[in-house]
């Protein structure tokens, strides 16, 4: 599907501005995941160049009685999520699916979409990356959604072992290269 009203130049400019704001937060905010000893040398995160090709419209299958999914974490624990939706889309001439999750008793509209792709462990963080999507309507009213891999980000555990992060379940391991979003963090 194409969005005739989509302005790619404005999109890229807005994306670069958001990345600049995130870099500023990571550089100086007390809640930054960058260890304090590394902040003086921190000069911003590495990103793939913005590419509207990796902004796709996915069909949404919602799950009225969501299946529980147990995800391992970076600290060898397990956390339980509910697969509340499945996104189906085409990217790089490949039909793909991603599960979207929420924790039990989460009343927000935010959907957690952890994933791995063929850049994982090479150009991107070894544990995979995340996206969070917040639809404008309730999940049961959602027919499709924009999945923007340019917004893919590293979990906080990519920056410090002080954090414990869920690892993407195998069902969200994409068999393609997705060169979009944040790259692997290399400590200065």
Image (spheres, rainbow, N blue to C red):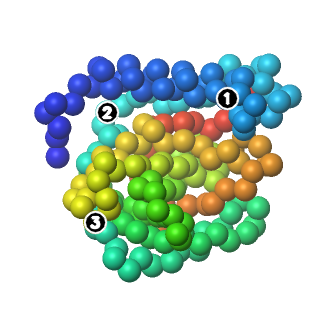
Q: Does 180 appear above or below 95?
A: above
Q: 5 or 52, which lies in front?
A: 5
Camera sees residue 170: no
Q: Residue 52 carries which label?
A: 2
On the image, the x and y values in percent for residue 57 come to 26, 48
Q: Residue at x 48, y 48 (%)?
A: 131
Camera sees residue 22: yes
Quadrant of residue 103 within the rendered picture: bottom right
Q: Count neighbours of disc 3 (C-alpha within 10 A) and say few if under 14, some if 14 to 19, many if 20 or more.
A: few
Q: Between marks 2 and 1, how big is the CA–CA gap?
A: 25 Å
Q: Which residue is drawn at 80% across and 49% down?
A: 162
- The residue indicated by pointer 3 is 140
Q: What is the residue that sits farthest to the left in this orientation?
A: 4
Q: Which quadrant does the C terminus fall into?
A: top right
Q: Between marks 1 and 3, how big is the CA–CA gap?
A: 36 Å
Whether residue 131 sits left or right of residue 139 in the image: it is right
Q: Count neighbours of disc 1 (C-alpha within 10 A) and say few if under 14, some if 14 to 19, many if 20 or more.
A: many
Q: Which residue is drawn at 45% across and 79% down?
A: 67
Q: 129 or 62, which lies in front?
A: 62
Q: Between marks 2 and 3, how big is the CA–CA gap?
A: 27 Å
Quadrant of residue 168 within the rendered picture: bottom right
**Upstream in sequence: badge 2 or badge 3:** 2
On the image, the x and y values in percent for residue 174 come to 44, 57
Secondary element type, mark 3: helix
- Number of numbered markers: 3
Q: Which mark is residue 26?
A: 1
């Amino acid at each position: 599907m194409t969005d005739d009203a989509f302005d790619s130049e404005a999109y890229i400019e807005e994306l670069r501005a958001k990345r600049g704001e995130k870099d500023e937060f990571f550089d100086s905010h007390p809640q930054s995941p960058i260890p304090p000893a590394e902040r003086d040398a921190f000069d911003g995160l590495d990103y793939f160049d913005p590419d509207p090709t990796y902004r796709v419209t996915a069909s949404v299958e919602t799950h009225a009685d969501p299946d529980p999914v147990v995800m391992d974490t970076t600290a060898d624990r397990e956390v339980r999520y509910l697969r509340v939706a499945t996104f189906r889309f085409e990217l790089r001439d490949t039909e793909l699916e991603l599960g979207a999750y929420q924790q039990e008793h989460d009343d927000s509209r935010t959907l957690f979409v952890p994933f791995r792709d063929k850049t994982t462990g090479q150009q991107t963080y070894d544990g995979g990356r995340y996206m969070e999507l917040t639809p404008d309507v309730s999940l049961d009213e959602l027919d499709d959604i924009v999945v923007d891999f340019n917004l893919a980000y590293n979990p906080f555990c990519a920056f410090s072992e002080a954090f414990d992060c869920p690892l993407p379940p195998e069902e969200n391991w994409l068999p393609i290269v997705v060169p979009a979003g944040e790259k692997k963090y290399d400590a200065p």
